Image (cartoon, rainbow, N blue to C red):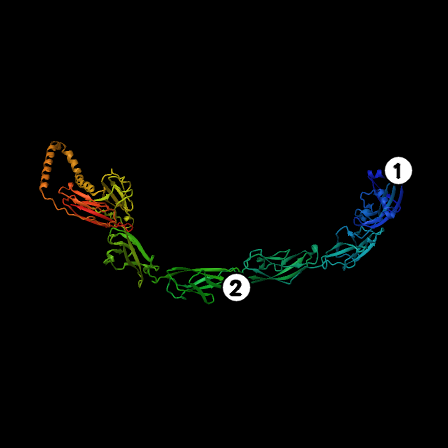
C-alpha cells in the first residue's frame, strides 16, 4: 500500500508493507513514553555510495554508547533506502545513488525523510535530507530533424514554429535560450508560454530561390544555465519548392569523344549533360539530334532521357575518321539549348599483314655460301600508325635470315653453311607482325630442298668387326654382313664393298674369304680347321659412287671356333701291340694307394678338351677307383689275401663336347708281393689271353661238333700224352742256353713314379718258361711287367720311363720288364 504524506515544507513519499505497519503500530503504542527530535541535511544529487551526509549523534546530542545500546536504526517507508546509519560512528552516509530527477521530477525543493529509532528508552528522531540539483542533463529535442517544404514564392515575414527542447534539470540548470545557425533567409524569434516554458519561431526575411539553393540545412541549439552549460541540437531541413522559370542548359558547348572502329552495337560513346534549374516536372527535358534527317542517325542513337549517345551501326576507320553532330535539349515549357558533338574514330588493328612472294628458288645446293638469296617477299598492312608498322622474322632456329633493303620488301638469304646430311629439307616459316595492340600477324611457309654433293665418305657401323665361325664349315657359308652408311644422296650414297687383297697363310686372302660387293656379306671360300687356323684378319673397303668417289676401310676378324671333332688320346699307359702292361700293387697297400695314373689329351680346345675319367669295367670294382678329373687309379680299401693277383681295369676317357667323344684303355694290375708270383700269374694270363681270344670260336665250334668231340675225345687225349712225352725227351738231351747275370739293383734306383720299389732278382729260364725260376730281392719300387706272348728266350731289357701328367703332377717313373 502506498500514500503521500505532505507537510507545509516538503513532500515525502511513503511506501508501507506489512512489516512496516506492525513496527509503526508498536511505535504509536509507546509514543507517550518516547522522546523526539528533528534534523535536516542538504546534499547534492549523484553522490557516491558511502559519502558522508552528517553526524547524527552530534546533531541530535547523543552519545555513541547510547546509539549502540539503543540499537539505533533507520525506519523509512521507501522501497529504496538511500541512506545508512553507522551506529558505531554516529554518522549518516549515502547508501544508494540519489537521482533528483528520478526522485522529484520538476518539483522543487526535493527532499526525503526517515526516522531514527532508539530503544530503552524509546526515542524517535526525524531526519530530512534535501537533494539539490546539479547540471547533469542537457536540453534535448523529441526529434532529430525538423522538416519544412517552402515554395520559392513564399512572402517575407512568414513564420514557422519550431519544436521545443526539454531539460529535466530545474532552476538555473534548466533551459535558458535557443540559438540558430546563421543564414541569409531566416531569423530566430524566442517566446515564452504562460507557465514560463520557452519556445522558438523561424521568420522568413529574404525570398527563397530554388535554382540558387534548393535545400537549406540549419541547426537549432537549446542551451541551459548550468555551469558548465549543456546544450541540445536539432537539424532543420528546408526544401525549396520549384517554379518553372529556367530553361535547360548544356554544361559544355562542344563535346568530344572517340570510338574504336569495329566496336559492337550499343557501345557507349559519350553522354551529353544538360541541366534545368527548375524542380520536379519543371525540370523535365529531352535530348534530340538537331538534324533528324541526317545519315548519322543510322550510325548513332541518343537516349532522350539521359543523353547517352551509343553506336547503332558499323563504322570503319578506313572509310570515316570523324563525325560531327548537334544535340538539342528541350523542357516541357518549350525552352531549349543546343551543343555540338565531335566523334573521332580510332583505328584498331583489324587488318593483318599480307605476304606476297616475289621470287623463290628451290632446291639449293648444300655447298652454297652464306648470304645466298633464296627468296624475295613483299609485306603490306592496310592499318595506319603503329597498327600498320610491320616487321618480319623467321620462326625457330634455322640457317636462314631475313633482311630489308626497301620499304615493305624483304630478302630471304642463307645465314650459315648448309648440310644436307643433317637436314635435307626446311620449312621456313616467315612471320610478318604489325605493332598494333594486340598485334596481328601473317606467316608464309617456304618449302626448301637442299641438293646433295659428295662430301661424306662411307662410314662403317663398327671400327672392327668380329665374327665367329665354327670349324668344318661348308664352303660358301655366310659368316657375317658388314654395313657402311653414307649420309649423301642417290649415287653419292651408293656403296660398293671391296676385299683388300693381302697375303694370308701363304696365299691370297681371296682364297679364304669373299665379300659381296653389293650386300657386304662375307662368305667362307673353303672349310677351316681350328687345329690348323684359329683366326683370319682382313680389310674391307667401302666406296661410294660419287665423283670423285670417297671410301673408308674396316678391319674384320674372324675367329674359328672349335668343334668336338677329335677324341681323347691316351698317353699313358702305352698300349703295345703284343705286350701286356701291368701295374704292381703290394698286398700291404693301404686305402688310397696310388696304383697308376691314366694320362690323356684332347687336341680340341675349350670344353671340348675337358676330360673326365671313369672306371668302365673292373675285375673287382670294390678294390679300385678312378679320379674323375685327374685319372688317378687308387685303392678304395685294404688289399687282402683273397684278392686275385690279376686285376683288369677298363678306364674310359670322355671329353665335354656335344656330342662327347671318348677313348678306353685297359690297365692290368698285379696284386702280389714277389715277382715269381707275378710272372707265374701273368704267364697264365698270356695263355689265358690266347684262350680268351679264341673262346668264342671254341664255344661255337663246341656246340656244332659236340657229338664229334665225344667220339674223338679218347684219340685226342692219347695224342697229347704222346706229344708231351716226346717233347720232354728232346729238351732233356739238348744244351741249356747261357743265362745272363744282372747285377743287383739293375733298375733305376731314383724312380719316383707309381712303382715305388726296386726289385733285385736272378732269373733262370729253361725252354719251358713255366719251369723257370726267379729270385727276388727286397722291393724298393713298384714295377710294371710287360710280357710278349711270343717270347721263348730270356729277358732282354729293363726300361725306366718317366711321365709328367700335367703341370701340377710329379713325374712318374715306371720300370718295364720285357720277357721273350
Q: As drawn, is 419 to the left or to the right of 589?
A: right
Cα distance in 3D space between marks 2 and 1: 118 Å
Q: Which of the 4 image quarters holds residue 282?
A: bottom right
The numbered dot on residue 29 is 1
User: Which residue is rendered at x = 16% and y = 38% of the image?
Assistant: 697
The residue at the far right in this view is 32
Find disc 2 in the rendering and name its residue: 386
Q: Tell how many labels.
A: 2
Q: Nearer the viewer, residue 757 or 668?
A: 757
Taking the view exactly as shown, the residue that stands out farthest to the bottom is 405
Q: Is residue 605 rendered to the left or right of residue 28?
A: left
Q: Which element type, helix, strand or loop, lies under badge 1?
A: helix
Q: Earlier in the sequence, mark 2 or mark 1?
A: 1
Quarter of image, res 634? top left
- State the mark number for residue 772: none
Q: Nearer the viewer, residue 639 or 301?
A: 639
Quadrant of the image containing the C terminus: top left
Q: Nearer the viewer, mark 2 or mark 1?
A: 1
Amino acid at each position: 500500500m502506498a500514500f503521500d504524506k505532505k507537510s507545509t515544507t516538503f513532500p515525502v513519499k511513503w511506501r508501507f508493507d506489512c512489516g512496516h505497519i506492525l513496527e509503526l503500530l508498536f511505535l504509536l503504542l509507546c509514543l507517550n513514553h518516547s522522546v523526539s527530535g528533528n534534523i535536516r541535511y542538504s546534499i547534492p544529487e549523484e553522490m557516491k555510495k558511502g559519502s558522508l551526509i552528517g553526524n547524527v549523534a552530534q546533531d541530535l546530542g547523543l552519545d555513541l554508547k547510547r546509539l549502540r545500546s539503543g540499537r539505533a536504526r533507520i525506519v523509512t517507508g521507501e522501497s529504496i533506502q538511500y541512506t545508512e546509519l553507522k551506529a558505531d560512528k554516529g554518522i549518516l552516509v549515502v547508501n544508494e545513488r540519489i537521482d533528483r530527477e528520478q526522485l522529484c521530477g520538476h518539483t522543487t525543493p526535493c527532499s526525503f525523510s526517515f526516522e531514527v529509532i532508539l530503544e530503552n528508552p524509546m526515542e524517535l528522531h526525524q531526519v530530512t535530507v534535501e537533494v539539490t540539483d546539479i547540471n547533469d542533463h542537457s536540453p534535448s529535442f523529441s526529434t532529430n530533424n525538423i522538416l519544412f517544404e517552402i515554395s520559392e514564392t513564399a512572402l517575407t515575414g512568414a513564420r514557422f514554429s519550431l519544436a521545443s527542447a526539454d531539460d529535466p534539470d530545474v532552476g538555473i540548470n534548466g533551459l535558458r535560450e535557443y540559438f540558430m545557425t546563421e543564414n541569409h533567409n531566416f531569423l530566430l524569434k524566442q517566446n515564452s508560454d504562460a507557465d514560463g516554458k520557452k519556445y522558438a519561431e523561424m521568420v522568413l526575411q529574404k525570398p527563397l530561390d530554388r535554382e540558387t539553393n534548393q535545400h537549406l540545412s540549419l541547426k537549432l541549439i537549446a542551451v541551459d544555465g548550468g555551469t558548465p552549460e549543456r546544450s541540445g541540437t536539432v537539424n532543420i531541413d528546408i526544401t525549396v519548392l520549384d517554379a518553372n522559370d529556367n530553361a535547360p542548359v548544356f554544361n559544355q558547348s562542344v563535346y568530344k569523344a572517340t570510338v574504336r572502329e569495329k566496336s559492337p552495337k550499343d557501345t557507349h560513346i559519350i553522354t551529353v549533360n544538360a541541366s534545368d534549374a527548375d524542380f520536379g516536372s519543371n525540370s523535365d527535358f529531352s535530348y534530340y539530334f538537331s538534324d533528324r534527317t541526317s545519315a548519322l542517325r543510322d550510325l548513332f542513337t541518343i537516349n532522350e532521357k539521359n543523353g547517352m549517345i551509343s553506336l547503332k551501326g558499323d563504322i570503319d576507320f578506313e572509310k570515316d575518321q570523324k563525325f560531327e553532330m548537334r544535340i538539342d535539349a528541350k523542357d516541357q515549357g518549350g525552352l531549349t539549348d543546343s551543343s555540338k558533338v565531335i566523334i573521332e574514330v580510332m583505328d584498331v588493328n583489324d587488318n593483318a599483314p599480307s605476304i606476297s612472294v616475289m621470287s623463290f628458288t628451290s632446291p639449293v645446293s648444300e655447298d652454297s655460301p652464306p648470304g645466298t638469296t633464296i627468296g624475295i617477299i613483299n609485306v603490306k598492312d592496310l592499318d595506319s600508325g603503329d597498327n600498320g608498322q610491320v616487321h618480319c622474322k623467321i620462326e625457330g632456329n634455322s640457317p636462314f635470315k631475313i633482311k630489308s633493303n626497301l620499304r615493305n620488301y624483304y630478302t630471304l638469304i642463307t645465314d650459315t653453311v648448309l648440310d644436307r646430311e643433317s637436314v635435307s629439307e626446311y620449312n621456313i616459316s616467315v612471320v610478318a607482325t604489325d605493332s598494333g595492340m594486340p598485334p596481328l600477324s601473317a606467316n608464309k611457309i617456304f618449302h626448301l630442298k637442299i641438293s646433295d654433293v659428295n662430301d661424306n665418305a662411307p662410314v662403317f657401323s663398327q671400327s672392327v668387326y668380329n665374327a665367329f665361325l665354327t670349324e668344318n664349315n661348308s664352303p660358301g657359308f655366310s659368316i657375317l654382313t658388314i654395313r657402311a652408311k653414307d649420309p649423301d644422296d642417290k649415287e653419292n650414297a651408293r656403296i660398293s664393298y671391296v676385299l683388300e687383297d693381302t697375303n694370308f697363310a701363304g696365299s691370297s686372302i681371296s682364297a679364304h674369304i669373299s665379300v659381296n660387293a653389293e650386300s657386304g656379306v662375307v662368305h667362307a671360300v673353303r672349310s677351316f680347321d681350328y687345329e690348323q687356323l684359329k683366326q683370319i684378319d682382313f680389310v674391307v673397303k667401302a666406296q661410294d659412287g660419287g665423283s670423285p668417289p670417297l671410301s673408308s676401310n674396316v678391319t674384320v676378324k674372324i675367329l674359328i671356333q672349335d668343334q668336338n671333332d677329335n677324341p681323347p688320346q691316351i698317353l699313358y699307359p702305352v698300349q703295345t701291340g703284343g705286350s701286356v702292361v701291368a701295374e704292381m700293387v703290394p698286398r700291404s697297400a693301404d686305402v688310397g694307394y696310388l696304383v697308376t695314373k691314366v694320362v690323356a689329351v684332347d687336341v680340341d680346345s675349350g670344353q671340348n678338351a675337358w676330360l673326365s675319367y671313369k672306371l668302365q669295367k673292373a675285375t673287382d670294382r670294390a678294390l679300385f677307383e678312378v679320379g674323375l678329373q685327374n685319372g688317378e687309379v687308387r685303392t678304395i680299401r685294404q688289399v687282402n689275401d683273397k684278392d686275385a693277383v690279376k686285376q683288369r681295369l677298363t678306364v674310359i676317357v670322355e671329353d665335354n663336347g656335344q656330342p662327347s667323344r671318348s677313348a678306353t684303355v685297359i690297365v692290368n694290375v698285379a696284386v702280389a708281393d714277389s715277382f715269381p708270383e707275378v710272372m707265374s700269374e701273368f704267364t697264365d694270363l698270356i695263355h689265358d689271353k690266347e684262350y680268351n681270344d679264341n673262346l668264342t670260336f671254341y664255344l661255337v665250334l663246341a656246340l656244332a661238333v659236340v657229338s664229334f668231340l665225344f667220339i674223338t675225345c679218347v684219340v685226342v687225349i692219347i695224342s697229347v700224352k704222346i706229344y708231351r712225352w716226346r717233347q720232354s725227351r728232346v729238351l732233356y738231351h739238348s744244351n741249356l742256353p747261357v743265362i745272363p747275370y744282372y747285377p743287383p739293383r739293375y733298375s733305376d734306383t731314383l724312380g719316383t713314379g707309381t712303382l715305388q720299389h726296386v726289385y733285385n732278382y736272378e732269373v733262370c729260364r729253361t725252354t719251358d718258361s713255366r719251369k723257370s725260376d726267379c729270385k727276388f730281392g727286397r722291393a724298393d719300387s713298384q714295377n710294371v711287367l710287360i710280357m710278349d706272348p711270343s717270347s721263348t728266350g730270356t729277358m732282354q731289357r729293363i726300361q725306366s720311363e718317366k711321365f709328367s701328367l700335367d703341370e701340377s703332377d710329379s713325374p712318374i717313373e715306371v720300370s718295364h720288364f720285357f720277357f721273350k
